[in-house]
Image (cartoon, rainbow, N blue to C red):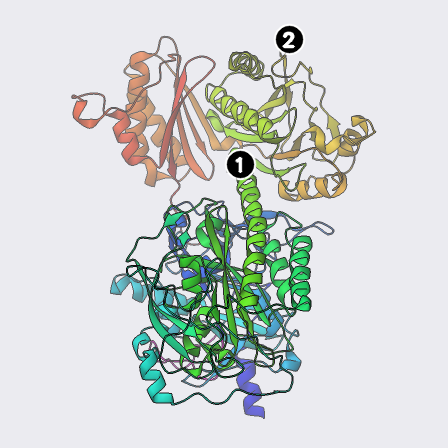
Amino acid sequence: MAARREQTESMVDEPNSTPRPAVTAAEPAAAPGDQPSGVVTLVRLALVLVDRSGRIAQWSRAAEELFGHRAEVVRDRPATGLLPAVEPRGVPRPAGTARRRCDALDTLAALTADGRPWAGQMPVVDREEHLRDVLWWAYRPAGPGSGLLALAADARPLRSAGPRLALGERLLPFAAAPAARGGFHRLSAALAPPGRPVPEPLARMLPAGPADHRERLLDGLGRAGLPALRLDPVTVLPVLPADPPAGTAHAAAGIGRRYPTAQQRAARLGPPPPPEQGAPGRRPPGPLPAQREIADRPDRPARPAGVVGGGGAPAAAPSVPAPPRGGATIEQAAVESSANGHQARRGDQAPPATVPAPSGADGGAPPGGRLGPFLTNGQAGEQLALLNEVGGKVGTTLDLGFTAHELCQVLVPRVADFACVDLVDGLISDSELPEARPDDDTMLRRVALVFNESAGQWDHVLTEGSLVAMPRHTPPGMALQLNQPVLVPVVSQDVAVDYAVALGGARLASVVSGRSMLVVPLSARGTVLGILKLLRLPDRAPFDEGDAATLKELAARAALSLDNARLHRAESKVATTLQRSMIPTRPPQIPGVQIAHRYLPGDSKAEVGGDWFDAIQLPGSRVALVVGDVMGHGLHSAAAMGRFRTAMQTLAALDLPPGQLLRHLDNLAHKLGDDHLATCLYAVYDPINRTCELASAGHVPPVLVHPDGRGELLEIPAGAPIGVGGVPFVAKTIEVTDGSMLVLCTDGLVEVRGGDIGAGLAALCGNLIDPQQSPEQACDVVLERLHSDDRKDDVALLVARFDGVAPTEVATWDLTVDHREVRRARALVREQLAGWHLEALADTTELLVSELVTNAVRVARDRVQLQLIRVDKLLVEVSDDNHNLPSLEPAEQLGETGRGLTLVTKLAECWGTARKAVGKVVWFELPLPPAPPGG
């Protein structure tokens, strides 16, 4: 026992609130690719790889299932904004404040910026706007500044049913004991001690590449600490990726061997056994009409024998030996129905289809003229009651997933023991109707799953959100592609594997065998949206044609509700995408000022409105702060807000004074002919001179919080809203002290229904904000105290903390309009960089300053200015009084001169030009060299 306890304690890591693994002595090295010894957890791991430029480089199949975004859509797109999230646990927060919204991949990049890994929990909003509880393991395999490698797992199934465990080299899985289920609420992500080699199952899922690159990747991952799960305070188990359920294509590789012809099956199995009489607990099934080929005309193809059509009469059986109960006969079938509005072509025959043909109660076929099972008054009443219940309980909301759940809940356990809804993934991701009918490559996403827990175990069925493929040779694939119900009264043992795969996983083969299956297409407005799959256990009567006809009608009604939900969500996505594209996702990093912002829509469902905010970097390390409010709500106001915000950014780039900028914005609003009015506040903060110039267009006045905590409501000439016209906009300049905070907001935050706006402003001026807090914390405190859920107006909040730039970090020189000043400028730059101990940047900076000063002296009339600012980078600006902006020309069009901007483009990290109130400025940035050890 002591040895076992020591082995268990050796796997203990620090709690995930402290994400850095302790450095311990490496264990005896195992060869790369060896299976780990001892107990491990098998987890469905999603892999996301972000390259150095911040773009998605790899997006695994498990990531598609977990987050909903398809790989072909997200690959090579910016990672920022893809996965909205809630701030992870373990990040310090003020007492009484809620965790704020953030971007998952940006947050992981920030947490691992120093090169050390991080493991923990961070809820994420998936593509369907559902909040998912996700466990994360984040790495920088190549060290700080390299790409981000993130592994993720859905925490909900792990905490509800417990993790799957494996023991030994063969990784034999076994489930947690039933009594322990639901007791894993403390389960969390952790990191194993560093120094362990990467096991082969984990190495296989990592991105491929050159051998040396992959070796560095594996080495970096092992040294950082492999992913692990903390089950309780003293138990940490390594994590290995769980293999996904076998796909239908793999399971159907031997389809020809498992589907013999009817004659071969009859010869092998012999005559059918006598039917069971009075089996306890079962309702005798109604007889199925026999199958026969339709021979109205010689060239007419036969209807698929396993398909229960909606309007055709079943035919008599051919003269072949009757198969046993649960057996299957195979016939060639042609597609006569229409799928997704495409008429089938003659000769476009379906692949072999399983056709169950259980014998009737008397062992013979029913009369040839019989069109279907006879319905008693009780059966008809039951079916009508079911249809009425579907009409009343399905489609009560316009949420797609909830509507699918309602459908499954109505059917289980009343009609079936298992029900799931799989919808075409393109309808969910793109909200567009497919141009082609479904085929073997059509991907379905499981949106709802309900089963009778007392009737059997369904733990290995693919969970909601999983992607599944339905080839045509399976009943679900046939129902999807033919747009017809497919009935399998009893699943025989030899085809149970294929049916199990169609239902979600080959592990269900033993559970599916002997069951009854019915697959019904969900078709609305001429489009197949997906399929409804139902399963009955042996203690119930199998599905019959009466059930198929009833459930086909039921599915048609439910499909209309699903399509309505799809259309509503498509409209909501348009509004949400419009609004999100116009609001900044994260504040810019500007020297001398810290910025945080929040946006809360008045309508939580629409998430769209007319409020906006912005932070725009200006020359000289200055920053423009903007908050505006378009009067009204909805898409029209959001569109007007987008025009105002774009115009504001364009005018700010001209570096106009705040009063002039609002005048130009008002004139532009009249030219656009928009009938919307907007209030706006525009402020420009200068971190070098410690001043702030503000102008208002009828907006809520800002609040300045001084370093001592005293709040001051700034008195600014109010002006009139943008769009009124004829009213001057007067600016006011104030001096600000380092450590002050400026709070800008819209009236939705401070205006109380039935009350005066002054009460809200008075609360904002009170001791609400602690100057020692960060702007992020200040935003949370303000919303916690002032905002309430019953308010119907949008809220935009922007908080800026003014830190300033120390005078010792700024060097400014005025130069005369003389070519000899170029040499002086180079000397000044070299001397200043030596004083800042930045000699490593001297040669490059001198060269670029020489080019820009030469250009400025050539075009200036009276004044040229050179300025160097050292913050987290070296910022160099050259200004002159000529307003014409220089342009970058192609190298082949340049002569002996004019190559200055080409050098700037090649050597500087970034550069730009901007107009000023008088003249222009050309600037560039260079990264600071790393500090020497111990410096």
Predominant SS along the magenta part: loop
Q: Residue at x 59, y 23 (%)?
A: 683
Q: Disc 2 marks which residue?
A: 727
Callout 2 amino acid? Val
Where does the N terminus fall, quadrant-wise? bottom right
Residue 28, image x, y percentages: 40, 82
Q: Residues within 10 Å of mark 1 (few under 14, many from 20)?
A: some
Q: Is residue 184 visible?
A: yes
Q: Residue at x 27, y 35 (%)?
A: 906
Question: Spatial distance from mark 2 to mark 1, Cα to Cα?
Answer: 30 Å
**Residue on which the image places disc 1:** 584
Please tell me whether mark 1 sits on a helix, a strand or a loop: loop
Left or right: 331 as drawn, with respect to 453: left
Marks 2/1 in contact by CB < 8 Å: the verdict is no
Judged left or right of residue 189, residue 467 is left
Q: Residue 680, percent across and down?
A: 62, 22
Question: In front here: 203 or 688?
Answer: 203
Q: Earlier in the sequence, mark 2 or mark 1?
A: 1
- Disc 1 residue type (three-letter): Pro
Residue situated in front as seen by the camera: 581 or 762: 581
Residue 895: percent from left, percent from top: 16, 21
| Residue 51 visible to an observer of this rendering | no
Q: Is residue 28 magenta?
A: yes
- Mark 2: secondary structure: loop
**Magenta region: which residues?**
24-41
